[in-house]
Amino acid sequence: EPEVTQTPSHQVTQMGQEVILRCVPISNHLYFYWYRQILGQKVEFLVSFYNNEISEKSEIFDDQFSVERPDGSNFTLKIRSTKLEDSAMYFCASSEGTSGRGETQYFGPGTRLLVL
Amino acid sequence: GQNIDQPTEMTATEGAIVQINCTYQTSGFNGLFWYQQHAGEAPTFLSYNVLDGLEEKGRFSSFLSRSKGYSYLLLKELQMKDSASYLCAISGGYNKLIFGAGTRLAVHP
């Protein structure tokens, strides 16, 4: 069964450093998402991406964050200058992108980011 | 804005039935999802409701009343492996999911 994959599974970085989190969405999916979950808290929407541009973003997704689809398979989230409060599990998700709104999203296993 | 409420914790016995409620207020609604999340793992899709009524899928059923802003997830024949968090989420905007805080279910023998 096709699945979303993410690398790395864990990342430790120093405050102020840049990190890039990588995702490979399900191959025929057209809509991609990033969510984060701070330990013990709820899953929070960051950004959605369709047709090579951002569809929607939350107030969390400020200028420190960017997303890119550098090739036909990868989808990345970059945090330019990490802060302590960026420590969280980051989930990538994808959906078919064919039926409009209310599509089922399939989540990757996550990257646990720790900022020291 | 959006607001989603669900109980923080529930306990149930193996083999029993449990109902997890979710109430919501939202300005945009493209459907309601239930996801299961085991500790340290990704959310996995359980069910989707966009119209009022009951959707049944094996041991899991989900109900929606849009006029009341209410949904529930019903789990039958509980198994130990059903111990997990159950996340209610509203699809709004361009497919973004807004999650509730989740209900942690503990199934005991």
Image (cartoon, coloured by chain):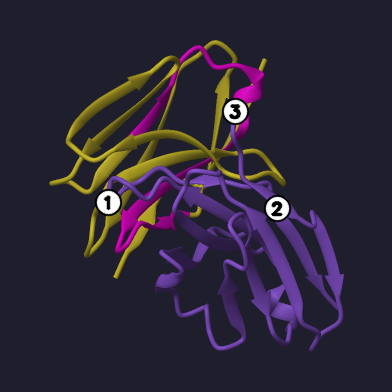
Chain colours: A purple, B yellow
Q: Which residue is mark 2?
A: A6
**Position of residue B90 in the picture relative to residue B75 (left or right):** left
Point out the tag, 2 or 3, that comes first from the N-terminus.
3
Q: Quadrant of residue B32?
A: top left
Residue A19 in picture, x, y percent from top left: 76, 75
Image vertical order of residue B88 relative to residue A2, above or below: below
Residue type, label 3: Glu
Residue type, label 2: Gln
Residue B72 in picture, x, y percent from top left: 34, 35
**Residue A100 marker:** 1
Q: CA distance from mark 2 to mark 1?
A: 25 Å
Q: CA distance from mark 2 to mark 3?
A: 16 Å
Q: Nearer the viewer, residue B29 or B1?
A: B29
Q: Nearer the viewer, residue A47 or B10?
A: A47
Which residue sits at x=86%, y=69%?
A12
**Position of residue B52 in the picture relative to residue B30 (left or right):** left
Q: Which class describes the residues within 10 Å of circle 3: few (<14), some (14-19), or many (20+)?
A: few
Q: Is residue B94 magenta?
A: yes
Point out the tag, 2 or 1, that comes first from the N-terminus.
2
Which residue sits at x=28%, y=31%?
B63
Q: Nearer the viewer, residue A96 or B95?
A: A96
Image vertical order of residue A4 relative to residue A85, above or below: above
Asked which secondary structure carries label 3, the reply is: loop
Q: Nearer the viewer, residue A29 or A15?
A: A29
Q: Which portion, as a residue range, is magenta? A: B72-100
Q: Quadrant of residue A114?
A: bottom right
Asked if badges 2 and 3 are on one and the same chain, I answer yes
Residue B104 in picture, x, y percent from top left: 57, 40
Number of marks drawn: 3
Residue type, label 1: Gly
